[in-house]
Protein backbone atom coordinates (compact mmCIF):
# COMPACT_ATOMS: atom_id res chain seq x y z
CA UNK A 1 0.00 0.00 0.00
CA UNK A 2 1.37 3.40 -0.95
CA UNK A 3 -1.16 5.80 0.56
CA UNK A 4 -4.38 5.44 2.46
CA UNK A 5 -6.59 7.98 4.17
CA UNK A 6 -10.14 8.32 5.41
CA UNK A 7 -12.60 5.52 6.09
CA UNK A 8 -11.99 2.68 3.63
CA UNK A 9 -15.77 2.11 3.53
CA UNK A 10 -16.73 5.78 3.43
CA UNK A 11 -16.91 8.55 0.86
CA UNK A 12 -13.64 10.06 2.12
CA UNK A 13 -11.70 6.81 1.76
CA UNK A 14 -8.68 7.20 -0.51
CA UNK A 15 -6.45 4.30 -1.45
CA UNK A 16 -3.35 4.12 -3.61
CA UNK A 17 -2.11 0.56 -3.73
CA UNK A 18 0.42 -1.44 -5.71
CA UNK A 19 0.57 -5.19 -5.90
CA UNK A 20 3.48 -7.04 -7.49
CA UNK A 21 2.52 -10.55 -8.55
CA UNK A 22 3.62 -13.35 -10.83
CA UNK A 23 2.35 -12.85 -14.36
CA UNK A 24 0.03 -15.82 -13.97
CA UNK A 25 -2.01 -16.69 -17.08
CA UNK A 26 -5.06 -17.17 -14.87
CA UNK A 27 -5.19 -13.40 -14.33
CA UNK A 28 -5.72 -12.98 -18.09
CA UNK A 29 -8.32 -15.75 -18.26
CA UNK A 30 -12.05 -15.56 -17.60
CA UNK A 31 -11.69 -17.58 -14.38
CA UNK A 32 -13.92 -16.29 -11.60
CA UNK A 33 -12.01 -15.83 -8.35
CA UNK A 34 -13.36 -17.37 -5.16
CA UNK A 35 -13.48 -13.88 -3.74
CA UNK A 36 -16.42 -13.21 -1.41
CA UNK A 37 -16.55 -9.55 -2.47
CA UNK A 38 -16.89 -10.43 -6.15
CA UNK A 39 -19.48 -13.08 -5.31
CA UNK A 40 -21.44 -10.48 -3.32
CA UNK A 41 -21.23 -8.11 -6.31
CA UNK A 42 -22.77 -10.82 -8.54
CA UNK A 43 -25.48 -11.62 -6.01
CA UNK A 44 -26.49 -7.98 -5.61
CA UNK A 45 -26.34 -7.34 -9.36
CA UNK A 46 -28.68 -10.27 -9.91
CA UNK A 47 -31.01 -8.95 -7.22
CA UNK A 48 -31.34 -5.58 -9.00
CA UNK A 49 -32.79 -7.39 -12.00
CA UNK A 50 -31.25 -4.86 -14.38
CA UNK A 51 -30.33 -5.85 -17.91
CA UNK A 52 -26.62 -6.42 -18.41
CA UNK A 53 -26.38 -6.89 -22.18
CA UNK A 54 -23.41 -4.65 -23.06
CA UNK A 55 -24.87 -3.53 -26.39
CA UNK A 56 -28.14 -2.52 -24.74
CA UNK A 57 -26.20 -0.57 -22.10
CA UNK A 58 -24.22 1.21 -24.84
CA UNK A 59 -27.31 2.06 -26.86
CA UNK A 60 -28.95 3.58 -23.77
CA UNK A 61 -26.17 6.19 -23.80
CA UNK A 62 -25.64 6.93 -27.49
CA UNK A 63 -22.43 8.92 -27.76
CA UNK A 64 -19.91 8.75 -30.62
CA UNK A 65 -17.63 6.69 -28.37
CA UNK A 66 -20.41 4.29 -27.37
CA UNK A 67 -21.34 3.90 -31.02
CA UNK A 68 -17.73 3.18 -32.02
CA UNK A 69 -17.44 0.47 -29.37
CA UNK A 70 -20.80 -0.99 -30.40
CA UNK A 71 -19.62 -1.26 -34.01
CA UNK A 72 -16.51 -3.13 -32.81
CA UNK A 73 -18.22 -5.09 -30.06
CA UNK A 74 -17.44 -8.47 -31.53
CA UNK A 75 -13.71 -7.78 -31.32
CA UNK A 76 -13.51 -5.59 -28.27
CA UNK A 77 -16.18 -6.55 -25.72
CA UNK A 78 -15.47 -9.72 -23.77
CA UNK A 79 -16.67 -11.32 -20.56
CA UNK A 80 -14.77 -9.72 -17.70
CA UNK A 81 -11.51 -11.51 -16.91
CA UNK A 82 -10.09 -12.68 -13.62
CA UNK A 83 -8.04 -9.51 -13.13
CA UNK A 84 -11.04 -7.23 -13.58
CA UNK A 85 -13.20 -9.40 -11.33
CA UNK A 86 -10.59 -9.22 -8.56
CA UNK A 87 -10.37 -5.43 -8.80
CA UNK A 88 -14.15 -4.96 -9.05
CA UNK A 89 -14.48 -7.19 -5.97
CA UNK A 90 -11.87 -5.13 -4.18
CA UNK A 91 -13.75 -1.88 -4.80
CA UNK A 92 -17.16 -3.43 -4.08
CA UNK A 93 -15.71 -4.61 -0.76
CA UNK A 94 -14.87 -0.99 0.04
CA UNK A 95 -18.11 0.58 -1.23
CA UNK A 96 -21.22 -1.42 -2.11
CA UNK A 97 -21.69 -0.81 -5.86
CA UNK A 98 -25.46 -0.84 -5.55
CA UNK A 99 -25.61 1.51 -2.56
CA UNK A 100 -22.98 4.02 -3.79
CA UNK A 101 -21.41 3.38 -7.20
CA UNK A 102 -17.72 4.31 -7.19
CA UNK A 103 -14.75 4.10 -9.52
CA UNK A 104 -11.23 2.78 -9.35
CA UNK A 105 -8.44 3.21 -11.88
CA UNK A 106 -5.59 0.82 -12.42
CA UNK A 107 -2.41 0.55 -14.46
CA UNK A 108 -0.98 -2.91 -15.14
CA UNK A 109 2.73 -3.07 -15.98
CA UNK A 110 4.78 -6.03 -17.18
CA UNK A 111 8.35 -6.54 -15.97
CA UNK A 112 11.17 -6.48 -18.53
CA UNK A 113 11.39 -10.32 -18.35
CA UNK A 114 7.56 -10.55 -18.51
CA UNK A 115 7.52 -12.71 -15.36
CA UNK A 116 5.90 -10.20 -13.04
CA UNK A 117 3.11 -7.66 -13.02
CA UNK A 118 2.82 -4.46 -11.07
CA UNK A 119 -0.78 -3.45 -10.59
CA UNK A 120 -1.37 0.11 -9.45
CA UNK A 121 -4.81 0.81 -8.05
CA UNK A 122 -6.33 4.11 -7.07
CA UNK A 123 -9.72 5.12 -5.74
CA UNK A 124 -11.17 8.00 -3.78
CA UNK A 125 -14.44 6.10 -3.08
CA UNK A 126 -16.30 8.54 -5.31
CA UNK A 127 -18.09 8.18 -8.62
CA UNK A 128 -14.97 9.31 -10.47
CA UNK A 129 -11.29 9.38 -9.59
CA UNK A 130 -10.22 12.94 -10.40
CA UNK A 131 -6.61 13.24 -11.43
CA UNK A 132 -4.86 9.99 -12.33
CA UNK A 133 -1.38 11.26 -11.44
CA UNK A 134 -1.18 9.11 -8.27
CA UNK A 135 -0.91 6.03 -10.52
CA UNK A 136 0.67 7.52 -13.64
CA UNK A 137 3.61 9.08 -11.79
CA UNK A 138 4.98 5.87 -10.21
CA UNK A 139 4.26 3.98 -13.44
CA UNK A 140 6.42 6.42 -15.39
CA UNK A 141 9.33 5.60 -13.06
CA UNK A 142 8.80 1.89 -13.74
CA UNK A 143 8.74 2.51 -17.50
CA UNK A 144 12.16 4.11 -17.27
CA UNK A 145 13.35 0.90 -15.60
CA UNK A 146 12.14 -1.14 -18.56
CA UNK A 147 8.64 -2.12 -17.46
CA UNK A 148 5.91 -2.05 -20.11
CA UNK A 149 2.50 -0.46 -19.79
CA UNK A 150 0.21 -3.35 -20.66
CA UNK A 151 -3.23 -2.12 -19.61
CA UNK A 152 -4.97 0.97 -18.28
CA UNK A 153 -8.14 -0.29 -16.64
CA UNK A 154 -11.00 1.42 -14.88
CA UNK A 155 -14.58 0.62 -14.12
CA UNK A 156 -17.88 2.14 -15.11
CA UNK A 157 -20.19 1.01 -12.35
CA UNK A 158 -23.77 -0.12 -12.80
CA UNK A 159 -26.21 2.68 -11.96
CA UNK A 160 -29.68 1.11 -11.97
CA UNK A 161 -32.23 3.66 -13.19
CA UNK A 162 -29.59 5.99 -14.69
CA UNK A 163 -29.15 4.79 -18.29
CA UNK A 164 -26.53 7.39 -19.16
CA UNK A 165 -24.25 6.09 -16.41
CA UNK A 166 -25.21 2.44 -16.30
CA UNK A 167 -22.24 0.10 -16.74
CA UNK A 168 -21.21 1.59 -20.08
CA UNK A 169 -18.27 -0.27 -21.58
CA UNK A 170 -17.02 2.68 -23.62
CA UNK A 171 -14.65 5.52 -22.85
CA UNK A 172 -15.89 8.98 -21.99
CA UNK A 173 -14.16 11.79 -23.85
CA UNK A 174 -11.76 12.40 -20.92
CA UNK A 175 -11.07 8.65 -20.81
CA UNK A 176 -10.27 8.66 -24.53
CA UNK A 177 -7.97 11.65 -24.06
CA UNK A 178 -6.18 9.84 -21.21
CA UNK A 179 -5.66 6.80 -23.47
CA UNK A 180 -4.17 8.87 -26.28
CA UNK A 181 -1.79 10.52 -23.83
CA UNK A 182 -0.65 7.18 -22.40
CA UNK A 183 -0.17 5.74 -25.87
CA UNK A 184 2.88 8.00 -26.07
CA UNK A 185 4.27 5.95 -23.16
CA UNK A 186 3.58 2.65 -24.90
CA UNK A 187 0.17 1.81 -23.45
CA UNK A 188 -0.92 -1.39 -25.21
CA UNK A 189 -4.63 -1.60 -24.33
CA UNK A 190 -7.30 0.43 -22.53
CA UNK A 191 -9.92 -1.58 -20.68
CA UNK A 192 -13.20 -0.48 -19.13
CA UNK A 193 -15.13 -3.01 -17.12
CA UNK A 194 -18.51 -3.00 -15.45
CA UNK A 195 -17.63 -6.21 -13.62
CA UNK A 196 -19.45 -8.51 -16.05
CA UNK A 197 -18.11 -7.31 -19.40
CA UNK A 198 -14.97 -5.47 -20.40
CA UNK A 199 -14.14 -3.46 -23.49
CA UNK A 200 -10.51 -4.01 -24.46
CA UNK A 201 -9.42 -1.32 -26.86
CA UNK A 202 -6.09 -1.78 -28.65
CA UNK A 203 -3.79 1.23 -28.84
CA UNK A 204 -4.11 1.16 -32.63
CA UNK A 205 -7.73 2.31 -32.22
CA UNK A 206 -7.25 5.06 -29.61
CA UNK A 207 -7.15 7.81 -32.22
CA UNK A 208 -10.62 6.85 -33.52
CA UNK A 209 -12.28 8.00 -30.29
CA UNK A 210 -13.76 11.41 -29.67
CA UNK A 211 -11.79 13.34 -27.05
CA UNK A 212 -13.89 16.51 -26.94
ZN1 LIG B 1 -14.42 6.34 -17.50
Image (cartoon, rainbow, N blue to C red):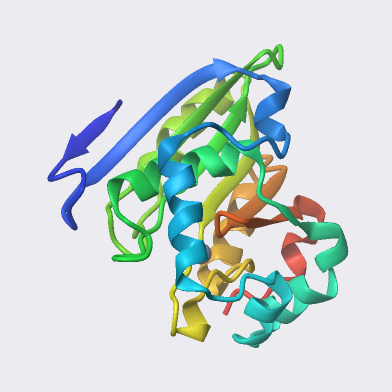
Percent position of residue 48, x then y: 46, 71
Residue 1, compared with residue 165, is above or below; it is above
Is residue 156 visible to the viewer in this orientation of the structure? no
Residue at image x 42%, y 31%?
Answer: 138
Residue pictured at 50% horizontal, 57% vertical: 155
User: Which sits in the foreground, 117 or 53?
Assistant: 53
Query: How far across and how far down the image is residue 35, in percent?
Result: 47, 34
Give residue 196's position: percent from left, percent from top: 61, 56
Q: Quadrant of the C terminus?
A: bottom right
Give the left or right position of residue 116, taking residue 49 as reference: right
Which residue: 70% across, 47% down?
189
The residue nearer to you, when weighing 3 against 93, is 93
Residue 143 makes an appearance in the image: yes
Residue 166 image point, x, y percent: 51, 75
The answer to whether residue 43 is left or right of residue 148 is left
On screen, residue 143 above or below 102: above
- Number of numbered callouts drawn: 0
Quadrant showing the N terminus: top left
Q: Is residue 172 left or right of residue 88?
A: right
Q: Is residue 43 above or below residue 207?
A: above
Q: Quadrant of residue 69?
A: bottom right
| Rendered image quadrant of residue 102 | bottom left
Q: Is residue 71 left or right of residue 201?
A: right
Amino acid sequence: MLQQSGDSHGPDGKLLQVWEVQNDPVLWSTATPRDPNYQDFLTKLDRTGIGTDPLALLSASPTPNSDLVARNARDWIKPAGCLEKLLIGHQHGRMDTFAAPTEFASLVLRSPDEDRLRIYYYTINQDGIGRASPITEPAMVDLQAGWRLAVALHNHAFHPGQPKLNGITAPSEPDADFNVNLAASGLEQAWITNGLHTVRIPASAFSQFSVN
